[in-house]
Amino acid sequence: MNLLERAVLSALPAIPRPLMRQLSARYIAGETVEEALDKLRELQTRGFQGVLDILGEDVADEAEARDVLKTYQEAATAAAEAGLDSYVSVKPTHLGLRLSRDLCEELYGDLLQHCAGLGVFARVEMEDHSTTDETLAIFAALRARFDNVGIVLQSRLFRTPDDVAALPEACDVRMVKGIYLEPADIAHTQPVPIREAFVDLTDTLLRAGHTVAVATHDSVLADAVLQRQEAASVPAERTYFEVLLGVQEPLWKQWKERGKLVRAYVPYGPEWRAYSQRRLRKNPEILRHLIKATLRLS
Ligand SMILES: Cc1cc2nc3c(=O)[nH]c(=O)nc-3n(C[C@H](O)[C@H](O)[C@H](O)COP(=O)(O)OP(=O)(O)OC[C@H]3O[C@@H](n4cnc5c(N)ncnc54)[C@H](O)[C@@H]3O)c2cc1C
């Protein structure tokens, strides 16, 4: 990243809202559930399934956590009634994990109950390492009561092989590299070991009877996962791909043409701005578009 790009990164919070909205349009469905459903519909016509994510994390109080639950319940209902193939994916701190573990587990339970009535799946997402123990404990408790729940595991963490071994039977696990840059005493920090761990962990999960949502845009990694799956004679339907809206779309198409199910993550909600800034930080290419657009405006 060059000096100009670094300067723009630090100025992101000051970028005018309409410009920010325009730049993030590719990665975010919009502010409302109607916009998210429109995006799911468009994906479905192109042969892709969806994952609904309401942007946000770390709620301030219990009332806010209960509002988030209600918004997710409404989204699941709306998508199911519209006949759209999607599920809901929820961050623990968005349902109050940092306020109270019991509250968080109760709200996930209510969400899963609601979703079960609609025939909809829901996933407990994984945040930074300070939340991993509680997130996995909540997931284990939920999995004992519900079939329609899945989890996320991060290949960068040294602990993940133990977490895989401790999973309940027959889970649906989203395998990711991990978006949170964790300290070197608990996590791999270099791309190669993170990728190798991803392949090994997926292999272990599949051999243990779990289903894996391979959430990546790294084609070399995806190929390695599929090769190991074939070598282990694991049925093809026990893996599918999950991708972020607007990221590496040609890959989605390739995977679909190879007969794989591909689900695109559809984030939406009033908190889109913070999410957009994260995307721009991750990808200098988008940052370059932002710089050009800003220069054109001025
Ligand atoms: C559906 C889905 C759900 C996820 N859920 C979680 C979660 O619950 N917890 C968690 O810690 N992490 C989650 N992640 C993020 C994940 O951990 C990685 O940070 C992210 O997927 C990038 O890693 P990669 O495997 O795509 O490989 P990379 O090597 O990072 O990316 C491969 C290529 O894709 C492009 N790319 C990747 N990510 C982006 C982006 N965000 N914006 C623009 N371009 C990008 C880059 O150009 C790069 O060349 C999720 C990812 C996906 C796809």
Image (cartoon, grey):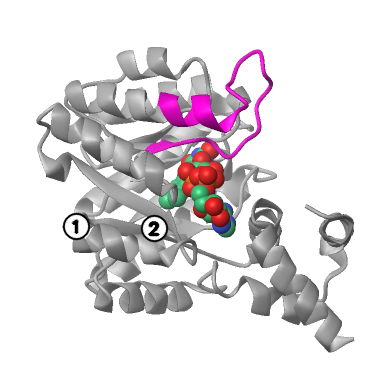
Name the residue type under label 2. Answer: Gln
Which quadrant of the rendered structure holds the C terminus? bottom right
Residue where numbered disc 1 is placed: 258
Q: Quadrant of residue 290?
A: bottom right
- Residue for point 63% across, 67% down: 270
- Horizontally, residue 199 falls left or right of residue 12, namely left
Magenta residue span: 175-197
Q: Nearer the viewer, residue 199 or 99?
A: 199
Residue 271 is situated, as x and y percent measured from the top left of the image, at 65, 62
**At 63% across and 65% down in the image, what residue appears?**
272
Crowdedness of circle 1 by 10 Å Cα count: few (<14), some, many (20+)? few
Verify whether residue 235 appears in magenta: no
Magenta residue check for 182: yes
Q: Which residue is mark 2?
A: 73
Label 2 sits on a secondary structure element that is helix
Label 1 close to label 2 by CB (< 8 Å): no
